[in-house]
Image (spheres, grey):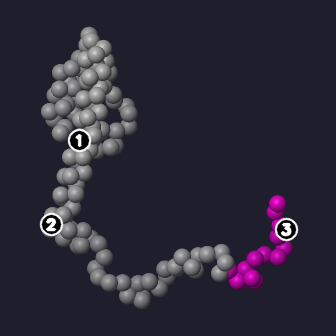
Amino acid sequence: FVLLPALVLWGLQGDCSLLEAVYFCFGSLSTIGLGDLLPGRGRGLHPVLYHLGQLALLGYLLLGLLAMLLVVETFSELPQARALVKFFGSSGPMTAEDQGGILGQDDLALSTLAPSAAAPEQAPTC
C-alpha cells in the first residue's frame, strides 16, 4: 500500500523523485500529511486522464486508510501487543489510597462552593 503506488506516482510524475513519492504515500496513509507534497499535473497528460488519475488517487487513499486501520486493529488484538499494554499499563485495581487526591465531577461543580468562598469586596461585573 506504500511502495507500489509510490512507484506508479513516480512513473507518472516526472518532476518528483521516488523518495518524494514514498513520502507522499506514507504521509497520506498515516494521516500525518502536512500538505507540503502534493501530486502535480502529469507531464503532458490529457486532462481526462489527469482527472481519472485524481479519482484513482482518491480511491487509493480511502482504501489505503481502511487497510491501515485493519493493520492497526489486527495488531492491537495480538496477545503480544496486549501483554505490552498490560505491562506498561496499570498494575491492578485502584485502591482507596490511589484515588485519594482525585476529585470527582461533583467536587468540581461551582454549586458546591461554600458561600464564604466568594469574595464580598469584589464589585459585580455586568
* Res. 86 image quadrant: bottom left
**Residue 123 marker:** 3
Q: CA distance from mark 3 to mark 2?
A: 61 Å
Of residue 28 and residue 55, the one placed in the foreground of this image is 55
Pinpoint residue 94: horizontal percent, then vertical percent: 36, 84
Against 56, residue 50 (above or below) is above
Against 108, residue 77 (above or below) is above
What secondary structure is the magenta-colored segment mainly?
loop
* Residue that carries the numbered disc 1 in the rendered image: 64
Q: Which contiguous range is marked in magenta?
A: 113-126
Say if residue 15 shows up in the picture. Answer: no
Kind of element beneath mark 2:
helix
**Residue 80 marker:** 2
Q: CA distance from mark 1 to mark 3?
A: 60 Å
Q: Amino acid at mark 2?
A: Gln
Q: Amino acid at mark 1?
A: Gly
